[in-house]
Amino acid sequence: MRVVLAMIPLLAGCSELDPNFAVSKWYDGVEMEENRPTPQSLHTVGINLPGTWGRTMDQASEGAFSWRFGDGLTWPAPCDASLQTPEFEAGHASFLRYAWYSDIPPLSPSSALDGAIVEVQIDGEAWEPVDPNGGYPYVLDPVQIGSPLSNGEGILSGNDRQWRNDYVGVETEPGQMVRFRFRFGCDIDPSNNMGEGFFVDDVEYLIVE
């Protein structure tokens, strides 16, 4: 089940979820961490092999560092590894704002075999996919074998090598506990796993109070 955003009023004359009218509660400390993700910043969940999530200076939207899935040349196959936020206390709406950069070869102009999705968890319930405001540029192609993601599901992928700013937002209730994650999945075939990988930067959590 994909999370559907309800339209709720934020300010007079504004009826859409928009993080520009929300209060920033947390900003990822990728520039301050010494070597690797920690539970207070974005942190890894899932397989922990060379070439999976880690901090890098090879690309950055702002500052010197970003988080990357891959080792700059390739990434493991198969894989199911997440870069997860800490748990936050929600407001009337919760947002995750971020920048992303991809060098993942697509299979066609509209589909790919490897890529990332954004998921949300509220009050410890099941993780649910959530659509970015800008939409997913690709879908997972059904020819894949062994991906942990669902065929036809939207994914962040592609090899245009440009930083893009986006956000996801969900309707929540004050006092609920919410967290987000970037989940990277790939199939069993490593022959297509050639590229810089997938990067995220400038990750920020905001709420409507």
Image (cartoon, rainbow, N blue to C red):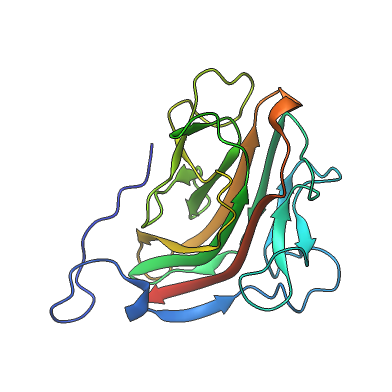
Given residues 156 and 203, the one toward you in this image is: 156
Instruction: Say left or right for 49 vs 125.
Output: right
Given residues 170 and 149, the one toward you in this image is: 149
State whether residue 209 appears in this view.
no
State whether residue 136 appears in this view.
yes
Instruction: Say left or right for 110 vs 38.
Output: left
Picture coordinates of residue 124 (x, y %)? 53, 51
Q: Quadrant of residue 38?
A: bottom right
Picture coordinates of residue 134 (x, y %)? 37, 56
Picture coordinates of residue 161 (x, y %)? 59, 54
- Give the residue displayed 37% in from the left and 73% down from the top: 19
Instruction: Say left or right for 162 vs 1.
Output: right
Quadrant where the N terminus lies? top left
Instruction: Say left or right for 35 vs 86.
Output: right
Picture coordinates of residue 74 (x, y %)? 78, 40
- Give the residue displayed 72% in from the left and 49% down from the top: 196
Given residues 97 and 93, the one toward you in this image is: 97
Quadrant where the C terminus lies? bottom left
For residue 120, above or below residue 95 = above
